[in-house]
Image (tube, rainbow, N blue to C red):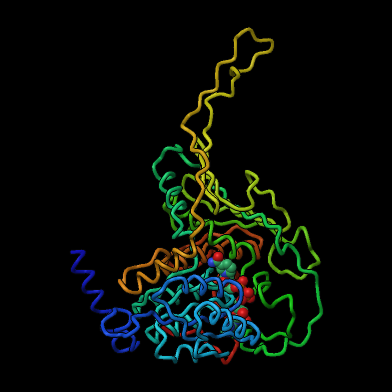
Amino acid sequence: MERRHFLKNTLAGATMLSFTSGSFSEIFGQKAPSNKIKVALIGCRNQGWSNLENFLKYPDVECISLCDVDDEWLNKCAAAVEQRTGKKPPQLVKDWRRVIDNQDVDAVIIGTPDHWHCLPLVAACQAGKDAYVEKPLANTIEECNLMVKAVRKYNRIVQVGQWQRSDPHWDEAAAFVQSGRLGQVRTVKVWAYQTAKWTLPVVPDSNPPTGVDYDMWLGPAPKRNFNSNRFHYNFRFFWDYAGGLMSDWGVHLLDYALKAMNVGLPAYVYGAGSKYAYPNDAMETPDTLMVTYKYPGFNIIWDHACGIGHGDFDKGEGLAFFGENGTLILTRGGWEVRPENNNRGRNFPYCYPCDDAPSPATPRMEAVEWKKGEGKGLYKHVGNLLECIKSRQQPNCSIETGAQTAKLSHLANISCRLGKALAWNDSTNTFDDKRANKLVKAYYRAPWKLPVV
Ligand SMILES: NC(=O)c1ccc[n+]([C@@H]2O[C@H](COP(=O)([O-])OP(=O)(O)OC[C@H]3O[C@@H](n4cnc5c(N)ncnc54)[C@H](O)[C@@H]3O)[C@@H](O)[C@H]2O)c1
């Protein structure tokens, strides 16, 4: 049955490709002379470049197109590609729609800010291209749902940039949690304590830098004067474009809370936080936030702080699965298990003065010493997509996974913004609150329109 199902899907995908992409033969290696996967990068700064750099480590990749609204980063990226490959990509553009029109592009890498993920991804799918799209998948729940629909309707292969999914120690740790050895897990704590970019002092509006198409940078977001605080990198601290630390770091880490506990979105969320530390700086998103996601039998807690680096277990970011037998601690660096003791070398109930000798502490399970991760997550994540482009199998971070974790982060932000606990109905995509339901939706500035799928 499974094989028949696979063949049916593969043939359906192949038929669609031959009509839509024009690059079927290259992907499947039938007659293309170079046998390369031809990629384009949209959004060339910071993570976009890191992604492309990892694509270029694979010999079957050729970068044929770059797009950025900022000449500076477009040119810097073109020079970096030339330095690595000896060849400048032939297409350098400021309008991403030219990349979608380019029939030679097999796959797009979308490294733009969060408010600019949905439109290019849906257009790429409609044009028969595969994609690597950055996390969080989108800036609203409505866009996330649309993107899932587009990938499935057009039968595309899309990897979401939650690269922990391809870093083996994350799955090892999740499997350990699922083995039951920790005993009942009642709390999963997930945190990001960040000292980098912890505050943004207010600066006046100004003209956009020369060479920047600022209107295209804003795209579907509301029209505003240019302010450098809201631009490159720092956009993540403004609601029009992103969701702060919650959706930036949260999606990476919370993904593994859901995976290890084998659950989807919760029925209840309460996010409490604000700009407690820097009330008068420019950031809109909370510098301090604690969220409770309530599940039957356990809670997932999210906790973030800008400007404080000593998170739990003195780790700046991570997850801790608190079980009755021990606690599993998981970070980008590795994982370990610290056992609970049946007693702490004292008798209970305590008696003072007490004649009994203290009984020895007996651990409830074996410790797992710190197991260092490989640190090659992004490289492997890219490699996994390239394999899947050829095999037409699902990549390690499917569009559904990306959507689920992005939505989880939006649930918390919406609760925090409204200052109240909310019930979420995942089958109808609605909250028990009218104002919250308004924040589920995407509002696009004309002439941009939410894509119809
Ligand atoms: N997976 C990870 O580990 C990871 C790490 C950092 C950032 N990210 C994600 O990557 C995305 C980008 O973040 P960043 O820190 O690289 O941002 P950035 O601001 O440094 O870079 C974004 C680039 O996109 C360009 N851009 C903006 N609008 C564009 C448009 N319409 N067309 C073409 N180019 C456009 C900008 O000019 C800029 O060069 C975000 O969604 C972020 O969450 C992921």
Which quadrant of the figure contains the C terminus?
bottom left
Question: Which residue is at a point 68% across and 90% down the rendered structure image?
Answer: 211
User: Camera-side residue: 182 or 377?
Assistant: 377
On the image, the x and y values in percent for residue 254 come to 52, 56
User: Camera-side residue: 323 or 60?
Assistant: 60
User: Camera-side residue: 421 or 368?
Assistant: 368
Question: Which residue is at a point 51% across and 46% down the rendered structure image?
Answer: 335
Q: In this view, does 213 lie above or below 51?
A: below
Q: Which residue lies furthest to the top in this view?
A: 355
Q: Can residue 129 be seen in this view?
A: yes
User: Camera-side residue: 55 or 94?
Assistant: 55
On the image, the x and y values in percent for residue 156 come to 36, 77
Seen in the image, is 392 located left or right of residue 102? left
Seen in the image, is 103 located left or right of residue 221? left
Residue 157 found in image quarter: bottom left
Q: In this view, does 253 lie above or below 187?
A: below
Q: Is residue 438 visible?
A: no
Question: Which residue is at a point 57% across and 60% down the rendered structure image?
Answer: 250
Q: Is residue 399 above or below residue 371?
A: below
On the image, the x and y values in percent for residue 100 come to 45, 88
* Count of numbered circles on the image: 0
Seen in the image, is 379 located left or right of residue 73? left
Seen in the image, is 119 located left or right of residue 212? left
Which quadrant of the figure contains the N terminus?
bottom left
Residue 286 found in image quarter: bottom right
Q: Name the quadrant where ligand 1 sits.
A: bottom right
Q: Residue furthest front?
A: 86
Question: Which residue is at a point 43% across and 65% down the rendered structure image?
Answer: 397
On the image, the x and y values in percent for residue 239 come to 65, 72
